[in-house]
């Protein structure tokens, strides 16, 4: 009698199931490159809130889809906005 595959993947399901149901993810495109934004303004709080979590942390590139240059610009803009009290440092 053959042995059952009892290996688990990171989510707790079996390794077989994850291969079957996984569909290819679309590559996220940088918002700033797509919209041809030349400057990430720290005073544009509505735009910066898209790149900050509900706890006030700057979201990662893999989550937001920004390119490396614009991720650096977003991080600098968020930090400047925090310093002049447009964005909070922490949301409890």
Image (tube, rainbow, N blue to C red):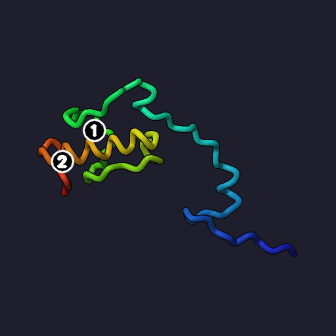
Q: Quadrant of the C terminus?
A: bottom left
Residue 82: horizontal and vertical position, in percent?
A: 18, 47
Q: Residue at x 64, y 44 (%)?
A: 23
For the view shown, which residue lies furthest in the left direction? Answer: 85
- Disc 1 packing (10 Å; few <14; some 14–19; many ≥20): some
In this rendering, the answer to whether 21 lies above or below 9 is above
Residue 22: horizontal and vertical position, in percent?
A: 64, 48
Q: Residue at x 76, y 71 (%)?
A: 4
In this rendering, the answer to whether 37 lies above or below 17 is above
Q: Is 74 in front, or is 28?
A: 74
Element type at mark 1: helix
The answer to whether the residue labelled 1 contacts the one labelled 2, judged by CB atoms less than 8 Å apart, is: no
| Labels 1 and 2: the sequence-earlier one | 1
The image quadrant of residue 74 is top left
Q: Left of 84 or right of it: where is 22?
A: right
Residue 42: horizontal and vertical position, in percent?
A: 22, 37
Residue 48: horizontal and vertical position, in percent?
A: 28, 38
Q: Residue at x 27, y 49 (%)?
A: 54
> What residue is pinned by disc 1?
48
Q: Left of 58 or right of it: where is 36?
A: right
- Disc 2 packing (10 Å; few <14; some 14–19; many ≥20): some
Q: Which mark is residue 82?
A: 2
């Amino acid at each position: 009698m053959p042995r059952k595959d009892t290996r688990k993947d990171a989510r707790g399901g079996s390794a077989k199931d994850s291969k079957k149901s996984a569909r290819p993810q679309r590559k996220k495109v940088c918002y700033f490159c797509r919209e041809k934004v030349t400057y990430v303004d720290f005073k544009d709080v509505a735009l910066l809130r898209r790149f900050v979590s509900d706890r006030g942390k700057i979201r990662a590139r893999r989550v937001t889809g920004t390119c490396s240059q614009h991720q650096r610009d977003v991080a600098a803009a968020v930090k400047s906005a925090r310093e002049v009290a447009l964005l909070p440092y922490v949301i409890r």
